[in-house]
Image (tube, rainbow, N blue to C red):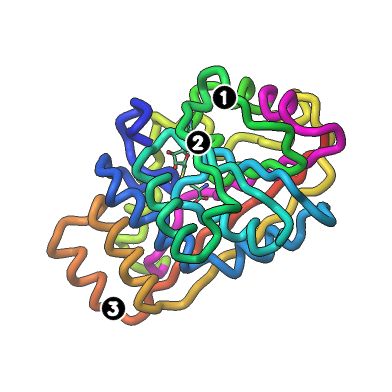
Amino acid sequence: MSQHGHGHGHGHGHGHADPQVQAEILDLDAEVVAEHTASIVDWLPVPAARQVVDLGSGTGAGTFALLSRFPEAHVTAVDASVEHLRRLRTRAGELGLADRVHAVVADLDSDWPDLGTPDLMWASASLHHMADPARALRQAHDVLAPGGLLAVVEVSGMPRFLPDHLPESRLEDHRHDERLPHRGADWGAKLIEAGFTVEGERTVTVHLEQSAAVERYAEMVLRHVLDPETLGRVLRRDDLSLRSDRIVWAARK
Ligand SMILES: C[S@@+](CC[C@H](N)C(=O)[O-])C[C@H]1O[C@@H](n2cnc3c(N)ncnc32)[C@H](O)[C@@H]1O
């Protein structure tokens, strides 16, 4: 994201430099896919976790799912964006979870700050932002407790909102951001190279019918792709949906 100098937008592929707008998109994404995220967290081969680190936490989509799944856990949320962590802390306060969340501003492309010895690490839609994800994975491997688990979640392709038969839907394919060369990488292979054993891989299909949140999400994303008139016309349709598959890898140290 732009805060650490790549000058492009949010990782699900919608270019926008304004951190407030990025944060809003992350919050919307968290809201609409909350059940999918919970099911990913439930699937992780981890009976209990006490020390958890959320790498590139954004506004906390993963942090809050992890806190809810592991009632004993304390989560350290690490992100380069002060604005995202500010939102995350505010939310933690509202939910009465402030004492279980620790927010750390750090650039994970540099040497990492002391993150303790977590038994679980989570990196959702963040690794593909890093200049050197292989190095980040090696650092994650070093930091994890022996036998600890790293969960990597990445989106497969761009989120799509328009029905395929609409000519405008082709524009949704052209949002690939060349400044994110690691998007869509083979994370299983990268995890093995970093020393992990991949214990599981799963694709979670997200297909949500139109709702107020999906419409808001579509508007925030498509306004970077469509001219205002086309955008207005598209948003008056009643057959929008959100399709955005997520792939998760469970990697053991
Ligand atoms: C697409 S967002 C994902 C946020 C969250 N994990 C989620 O699933 O909603 C990517 C996040 O990674 C963070 N990020 C990207 N590169 C980073 C870096 N080098 N160091 C720390 N955080 C980084 C961004 O600030 C952003 O919050």
- What amino acid is at disc 2? Val
Q: Quadrant of residue 206?
A: bottom right
Residue at 33% over, 71% down: 215
Q: Which residue is mark 1?
A: 113
- Relative to 81, residue 213 above or below: below
- What amino acid is at disc 1? Pro
| Residue 128 shows in this picture | yes
> From mark 2 to mark 1, how far is it between C-alphas?
9 Å
Q: Is residue 127 magenta?
A: no
- Check mark 2 vs ligand 1: CB closer than 8 Å? yes or no: no
Relative to 56, 36 lies left or right: right
Q: Which residues are magenta?
A: 138-163
In the rendered image, the quadrant that contains the N terminus is top left
Q: Is residue 156 magenta?
A: yes
| Residue 189 shows in this picture | no
In the rendered image, the quadrant that contains the C terminus is top right
Relative to 233, 246 lies left or right: right
Residue at 69% over, 58% down: 41
- Between 175 and 147, the residue placed more toward the observer is 147
Q: Quadrant of residue 19?
A: top left
Q: Which residue is mark 2?
A: 104
Q: Position of residue 155 (x, y in %)?
A: 55, 49
Q: Are marks 2 and 1 in contact (CB under 8 Å)?
A: yes
> From mark 2 to mark 3, how far is it between C-alphas?
42 Å
